[in-house]
Image: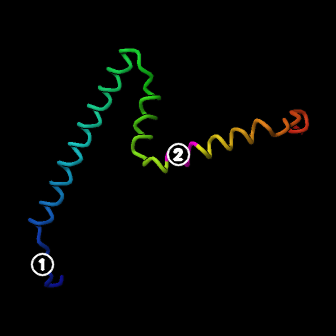
Amino acid sequence: MSDITIPGGKIRSFVERIENLDTEIQELSEQKKEVFSEAKGEGFDVKILKEIIKLRKQDQDERDERESLLDLYMRAMETAPAEDKTAKAA
């Protein structure tokens, strides 16, 4: 074996800190689920709430660009001729 010394105490400290953070993350995830359950119990649509949270994380320019592209794609689909379903199956 070589003469390299590995600082075991330092490694243990990092590992324990990471384990504590993992535990906190798990607890926060459970709390988040409880809030969504509470909202659902009061009649709110959880999917819509999640979409709002996602949108609020974006800046206004990013949101505007996304909405413009979505609108553009939807209009393009609506104006495109419908495919013949029998030709598609062949």
66 drawn magenta: yes
In the image, residue 32 lies at what x, y percent?
30, 32
In the image, residue 21 lies at what x, y percent?
20, 48
Q: Judging from the image, what secondary structure is the residue with disc 2 in?
A: helix
In magenta, the rendered stretch is 63-67
Which mark, residue 5?
A: 1
Q: Main secondary structure of the magenta part?
A: helix
Outermost residue on the left side: it is: 9
Residue 18: quadrant of the picture? bottom left
Residue shown at 45%/47% (left/top)? 60
33 drawn magenta: no
Q: Amino acid at mark 1?
A: Thr
In the image, residue 6 lies at what x, y percent?
14, 74
Outermost residue on the top side: it is: 42
> Is 72 rendered above or below residue 5?
above
Residue shown at 43%/26% (left/top)? 46
